[in-house]
Structure formats: structure tokens, C-alpha cells
Image (cartoon, grey):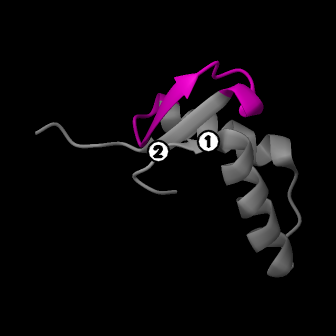
């Protein structure tokens, strides 16, 4: 995750590849659920239709100035 907006589908896909390379098998819906939970908790900022990976973008939450 970065400070720049990224498509959620890309974040999930890159996470899947990293986890699979390490031998950890998990599905995309598990990771998508985690991204949405972290957005709900305020760790990430989300824009777009938060129900669909391909229609949403996330970034690390920016602190108020």
C-alpha cells in the first residue's frame, strides 16, 4: 500500500502474488474483505464503489494537516 491512489484489484493481485510466492495460499475475496475492513477502520482511504474491487481505489490514510 502506498500514499498514492491504487486500484483495489491491483492491490489484491499484488498481495496474492507475494503471498503465493511465500507459499501461503489465500483467495482474492479474503484479501478484498481485509482491504474493505481496513478502509472501514480508517487505516486506508477508499474512493469509488467500495463493493467492487475493479471500481474502487485505496491509499494509506493521510493525517490531517
Residue 65 horizontal/vertical position (percent): 10, 39
What kind of element bears circle 2?
Answer: strand
Q: Find the magenta span and give its range.
A: 40-55
Measured in 3D between alpha carbons, the distance from the residue under mark 1 to the one under mark 2, in whole angstroms, is 10 Å
The quadrant where residue 48 appears:
top right
Tell me, yes or no, whether the two marked residues, 1 and 2, touch with CB atoms within 8 Å. no
Marks 1, 2: nearer the viewer: 2
Give how far across and how far down residue 23 sits, in percent.
Answer: 86, 79
Q: Residues within 10 Å of mark 1 (few under 14, many from 20)?
A: many
The disc at residue 59 is: 2
Please name the residue shown 80% across and 81% down the image.
22
Residue at image location 46% in from the left, 57% down from the top = 2
Residue placed farthest to the bottom in the image? 22
Task: Name above or below for residue 51 compared with residue 15.
Answer: above
Reading the image, the residue beneath label 1 is 35
Residue displayed at 50% across by 34% down: 39
Residue 44: assigned label:
none
- Residue 51 placed where, x, y %? 71, 20
Location of residue 26 by image quarter: bottom right
| Residue 5 on the magenta segment | no
Camera-nearest residue between 22 and 1:
1
Q: Which numbered disc flags the more N-terminal residue, 1 or 2?
A: 1
Amino acid at each position: 500500500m502506498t500514499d498514492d491512489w491504487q486500484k483495489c484489484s491491483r492491490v489484491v493481485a499484488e498481495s496474492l502474488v507475494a503471498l503465493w510466492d511465500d507459499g501461503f495460499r489465500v483467495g482474492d475475496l479474503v484479501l478484498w474483505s481485509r482491504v474493505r475492513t481496513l478502509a472501514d477502520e480508517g487505516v486506508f482511504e477508499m474512493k469509488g464503489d467500495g463493493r467492487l474491487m475493479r471500481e474502487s481505489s485505496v491509499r494509506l490514510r493521510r493525517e490531517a494537516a
